[in-house]
Every structure is written in C-alpha cells, then in structure tokens.
Amino acid sequence: MAIFPIRVFGDPVLRQRAAEIEDIDAKLVRLSEEMIETMYAAPGVGLAAPQVGIERRIFVYDVGEGPVTVINPAILESSGEWEYEEGCLSVPDLHWTIVRPKQVHLVGRDLHGNEISIEGDELLGRVLQHELDHLDGVLLLERLDKDQHKQAMRVLRARAFAGDSSLDA
Ligand code: ZN
C-alpha cells in the first residue's frame, strides 16, 4: 500500500475547491485506504484528498475509534464555541489556538454509497470542520486572527526563503 507525500503550504492544490464525487468505485476505495495509511504514518487525526494532491471531496479521520471515510460531506448545523490548539499536516510544526463551533452535524456518504450522519463534538467536531475546509481550498491560516496570521506568514515566508527541509513532511 502506498503512502502519499503530503502537500504543504504554497502548493496551489490546497487552494482549490475539490470536485464532488460521482462514482464510488474500487479506485476510490483504494484511495481511501491509502489516505488512511498516509494519515497514520504522518501521524495525523485527519487527512483530506487535496492534501495528497487529489481534488475530490473525500476525507478520512480517526479520533481514536477507528478510521472513517467521508465522501461529499456537508455541515448541516453547527453550534457553540470551542477553543482548541489546532495544527495541520500541510502547515507542519505550527499550532494556533483557534475558536470554532463546538458541535457540528455533518452528513455525507460512506464507501458503499450509503448516507452517513455524524454528530461531532469538541475534537471530532474540530476535525470535521478542518477537513471540510480542505475540500473548499481553505487552510487553517484563514481561521487565525489578525495577529496570529501576521506571525504565521512571517514564519512561513522565512521558511520558504531558507528552503527549510522540514516542509517535506
Ligand atoms: Zn489540515
């Protein structure tokens, strides 16, 4: 089973809106398996297809209860507020305290094409929002406040100039 290289900040694929998935076939099942392997190897709690260079609406996650694959997800409802130290495999080694809704109700499809409905609270809620953002071409950098964003861009620019090899996560 192949492990994908993870695309990092600066790669235009991370800024594209990924396309809806029409057909759930053996190729997609294989993609999901390889994304799960890649997520565990990273290691991370979630991984969206654009992070491995594939512009399709699928993500995987595991918050400690086994791997889950979600296809064509949408958030129907969100509520509350929750502060959490959030990071991203595509922006390696950096974390910020980010406030987002605490609970979300997400729907989508599984690998059999069946509808799934997930109520995510706290960490799960956060992962679902983070991964759905990736499918819309949104990085966590866009969820930072003004000061955090300024500081983040300073670090990322310095890395780009230095040709920092830690970006090859
Ligand atoms: Zn991410």
Image (tube, grey):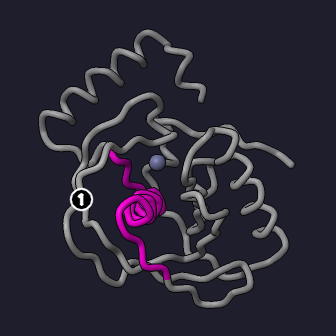
Q: In the picture shown, does residue 81 fall above or below 166?
A: below
- Relative depth, front residue between 54 and 4: 4
Q: Dot 1: what SS? A: strand
- Residue 40 rendering spot, x and y as whole percentages: 67, 46
Residue 60 drawn at (x, y percent)? 61, 62
The vertical placement of 70 against 22, above or below, is above
According to the image, label 1 marks what residue?
A: 82
In the depicted view, which residue is nearer to us: 118 or 166?
118
Where does the C terminus fall, quadrant-wise?
top right
Is 57 placed above or below 86 here?
below
Q: Identify the image quadrant of residue 35.
A: bottom right
Amino acid type at circle 1 is Trp
Q: Residue at x 26, y 21 (%)?
A: 154
Tell which residue pokes out farthest to the left in this image. 146
Most distant residue in the bottom direction: 114
Q: State left or right for residue 104 relative to residue 59.
A: left
Q: Is residue 100 above or below residue 104?
A: above
Q: Is residue 142 left or right of residue 135?
A: left
- For label 1, the crowd category at 10 Å Cα-Cα, with few meaning under 14, some 14 to 19 and many 20 or more, is some
Using the rendered view, name the quadrant where residue 34 is placed.
bottom right
Q: Main secondary structure of the magenta part?
A: helix
Residue drawn at 55 percent across, 51 percent down: 45
Instruction: Give x and y (percent) for residue 49.
Output: 60, 57
Q: Between residues 162 and 151, which one lies in front from this camera angle? A: 151
Residue for point 54% across, 58% down:
63
Q: Position of residue 77 (x, y in %)?
A: 30, 82
Q: Which residues are magenta?
A: 118-140
Q: Quadrant of residue 31?
A: bottom right
